[in-house]
Image (cartoon, rainbow, N blue to C red):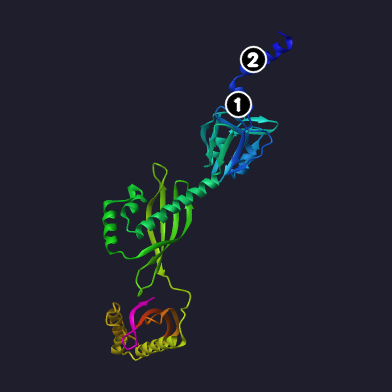
Amino acid sequence: MSKSIKAFLLICLAVMIVPAYALAANAAVSVTVDGKTVKFTNAPVRKDKATLVEAKPLAAQIGATYAFDSKSNTATLKRGTTVVKLTVGSKSATVNNTKKTLLAAPYSVKGYMIVPAEFVVQSFGGTAKWDGKSQLVVTSPASVEAASKRKAADVVKAYITALSNKDLKSVKATWLPASWSAQDEADMKEQFKEQTEKLTLKSTKIVSFKGASVTIDAVVQVDVQSPYALDEIHELTFVLVKDSAGVWKIKSEEWTGADYDLPQKSASASAEFKTSVNKFIEQYAANLNDENVDAIASMFAADSESAAEEIEYWTYDFEDYDSYYTPSDVFLFAADEKNGTASVLVTFEVEDEGELYSFDSVLFLKQDASGNWVIQEIVDL
């Protein structure tokens, strides 16, 4: 056998017996944060099930500050209220003064501090996953937080949808078991028996987020499913917490305010139609000024549900006050000339014994068999 052949065989044998971990140690390691590859002066390495990278560039990519104390060889990283301290050559670190044990000790290369990336990222609330080959995939704390907020808002949306659909099982699923009682379930069943409204979540706003607890302000539109009623806008505040499985659940709900959802655009109608509506409103005001209860009563449809309450109110009002009503603004926001219906928002300027004030009423009108306007329902705002 020639010398050249022997030399070749010896080289092949040497390659075959090189330990697998030695080859792996030379494999290029990359780190991505939110899908973007991070550039380091010193290439990351994988050791002791940890990915070791330069601390300063990593901190910048996850939204943390970096400072190094050369006297103690200690790096301090901060993000929000979280403070992480690591020391060169020590497997002991602190997170908000609480001691933690590292898989690999930080070290220094030409003035660059190298730290275990997974520990740093997770300490600030991010995630870091090794792909098993050559890449550490990091999701920044900000991205984790944003995703968590979206999931919390989705729970509120699911709750409102379940309420609208009268789906008791789905309603219950959105609540923290400890905050949901048998009485809550009984009350909800009774509510669903009478509920005709449809609910739509219009918006959510995170007002407080503490990782495992979030407070959300929500705006919900309530469609009362009636041509003679106004939709409503309700404001609610939800507090959500994570259950034992890390899933957001509603802990409490508070209704903080409500208002009518008034249209902002006037309805299209002929001049004749608008004039007839305006004349009816003027006559209504004239009857108020004359304190003519019978005349006011005659302006309501026979099947009006609000007529009795309105007549009772004006009867007592006329006994105690002497007021003058002027319709200063008549806003027609719904009109159906074919079927003879109109919805109008009226602002009344009122003079009461020298005092001036205003109030708004929404009148739902329809034309009777003779083509005359009558009040089907009225809502005082």
Q: Is residue 229 above or below residue 201?
A: below
Q: Amino acid at mark 1?
A: Ala
- Please determine whether, in this image, residue 113 is positioned above or below residue 18: below
Residue type at mark 2 is Leu
Query: Residue at (34%, 72%) from the top-left corner?
Result: 226
Residue 183 falls in image quadrant: bottom left
Pinpoint residue 75: horizontal percent, then vertical percent: 62, 36
The magenta span reads 367-381
In this view, the residue in front, 81 or 255, is 255
Splitting the image into 4 quarters, where does residue 317 fall? bottom left
Q: Is residue 137 left or right of residue 315?
A: right
In this rendering, position of residue 278 left or right of residue 112 = left
Q: What percent of the width, then of the height, locates residue 178?
A: 33, 47
Figure check: 214 above or below 310: above
Q: Residues within 10 Å of mark 1 (few under 14, many from 20)?
A: some
Above or below, 253 relative to 66:
below
Q: Is residue 311 visible?
A: yes
Q: Is residue 348 magenta?
A: no
Q: Residue at x 66, y 30 (%)?
A: 108
**Tags 1 and 2 in contact by the CB under 8 Å rule?**
no
Q: Mark 1 or mark 2, which is nearer to you?
A: 2
Q: Secondary structure at mark 1?
A: helix
Total tally of numbered discs in the picture: 2
**Mark 2 crowd level (few <14, some 14–19, many ≥20, 10 Å Cα):** few
Which residue, given by chain and number where applicable, does mark 2 sit on?
13
Report the magenta stretch's main SS. strand
Which structural element holds mark 2? Answer: helix
Report whether residue 322 is seen. no
Residue 194 rendering spot, x and y as whole percentages: 28, 64
Magenta-span inclusion, residue 372: yes
Residue topped by disc 1: 24
